[in-house]
Amino acid sequence: MFQEYDVIVVGAGHAGCEAAAAAANLGSKTLLVTMNMQTIAQMSCNPAMGGIAKGQIVREIDAMGGYSGIVTDLSTIQFRMLNRSKGPAMWSPRAQNDRMLFHLKWRELLENTPNLDFYQDTVGELLIKDGVCYGVKTGLGHEIKGRAVVLTNGTFLNGIVHIGEKNFGGGRMAEKAATGLTEQLVNQGFESNRLKTGTPPRIDGRSLDYSKMEEQPGDTEVSGFSFLDIERPKTQRSCWITYTNDAVHDILKTGFDRSPMFTGRIDGVGPRYCPSIEDKINRFSERDRHQLFVEPEGWNTVEIYLNGFSTSLPEETQYEALRKIPGFENARMFRPGYAIEYDYFPPTQLSYSLETRLLKNLFFAGQINGTTGYEEAACQGLMAGINAHQSASNKEPLILKRSEAYIGVLIDDLVSKGTKEPYRMFTSRAEFRTLLRQDNADLRLTELSYKLGLASEERMERVRQKQNNIAAIKKIVAETFIEPSEINTWFEQINTAIISEKQKAQKILLRPSVEIEDMIAVLPKLKTQLSNFDKESIAQAGIQIKYEVYIEKERELVQRMSQLEELEIPESFDYKKISSLGNEAREKLTKAKPRTLGQASRISGINPSDVQILMVYMGR
């Protein structure tokens, strides 16, 4: 019934969809196995993509030829560029999405992807022989062979849903858990553990009084995520902000004695940076209110997602507390919030290609690795799909460096340091964030992906044109002189020092209060010279000119750090023979098996003296 596949992807969440698309687009005959074809790319939690650091990841996925950015743009109902008051390295795009449209667009793209087949079934067992994974066995008893297998099981591995004192098996509300895989992998020598995540109640938007809330409209200009020409929404839906209060907190506290979190019924560790409302009240007892975001679920639905009110308290407690929130006095719930507990495998058991160390040709991506968030899952799926194809084709894996992408930072963090709580990406995790901006993801990654065979010719041609445009714009700005009479009136309006003699436009642009778009608006000759260039190229040229000194300093730092990254450690290296290393260092290095000295230096518990010892020993 089934042919032999090059790549089999298990699970069709954000990681699985990107993995299947990448492998298929690279030429591998790919099978995507999912428990339910109607929930492909389901937004299980909030109907949004991007945000701080996450937006950078989505743009990187898009630059490499992934689908997340395209689907996000096609289903956006509101767009905002966060952190605009800070420097460009901190700007992060975020989109509110139509939940149902997001799923439909993903499915449409996948169904139009050559080399990709689908099958609806569960996978409860892997086919393994002599330390090699060579396929899967489905719930209906089918054995499907593949040269590489990617597991993207999300929250489904032995998942348990908790609502107050009630709990039942499930990977999501109304969807059954996946069993068998954890037990088989543990028998193969893998270490597994438990994590938990949660989601807030869904509300009937018709029952809310928005006059008591603060409106949060989208940006006037929708720049979007994809570097391709995707049609942006011409209108947007507003989100709203409201707050909890003492009355809300007092009601929620009455349910603490029945909370699965506080009574010990949940063993898994929850996300530190996205805690439940009961956890917020407990941990931040000094605060008398917490911010809540009232987010519409789509263009044509009244369903509301109450961001910030994730909870697993009893349903009646949730309902009573909700009605004390300003604007929610008459609120009706579509469904209560709940927590979900699930198995994951500490990612220190992976190589940097996301292939497991214990079983060849088996790859993990997404929440199975201990991460949280659609974006973190999607980028792992992209890399696992790429490297599953590379493995099936007997080619070298693609591994992104920390200096090349947030994706590289994320994977390096997971593999080098592991995680004992749901891992979420932040800009602070990247030491080279001046280089890793959301605006230049295409310039950083498209050529690399194009050479691999994933990014299209269209993408590569757009990057070449953009590079040429940027160079031309920078040349014009460097050679254009501005007379005092042309600009001093404007300088006085923005309260910056006037000039007494002509200056190059390039020097003027270095002022903190001056942006290239503003200069074009007030200087007719600059506007004429740059009239044939697109906004994106102009903005990129402006950033490069303005922050050139900082960008160059970071490049120099990357160069110095690369010396450690280039010193490769043989996989068979025996750390136990180095008596000058402490017991802890020998144990951690043996377990982590770092690929380079740079990666060894980032392992928790490894100090600079340990790295020096390794360097000397390898030099010998």
Image: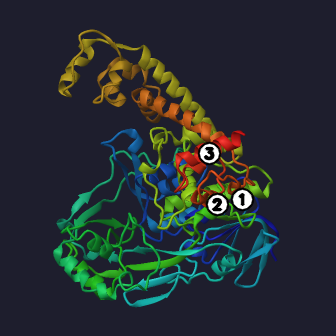
Q: Nearer the viewer, residue 101 or 593?
A: 593
Q: Which mark is residue 613?
A: 3
Of the residues under marks 1 and 2, which one precedes in the sequence?
2
- Is there any visible trace of residue 584 in the rendered image? yes
Of callouts 3 and 2, which one flags the residue occurring earlier in the amino acid sequence?
A: 2
User: Separation of disc 3 and disc 2 at Cα?
Assistant: 39 Å
Question: Which amino acid type is marked by label 2?
Answer: Ala
Q: Position of residue 520 (x, y in %)?
A: 35, 25
Determine which residue is flagged by label 2: 19
Q: Mark 2: which secondary structure?
A: helix
- Residue at 74%, 60% in the rendered image: 115
Tag of residue 388:
1
Q: Nearer the viewer, mark 1 or mark 3?
A: 3
**At label 1, which amino acid type do we have?**
Ala
Q: Position of residue 380 (x, y in %)?
A: 59, 58
Distance (Cα) linking label 1 and label 3: 35 Å
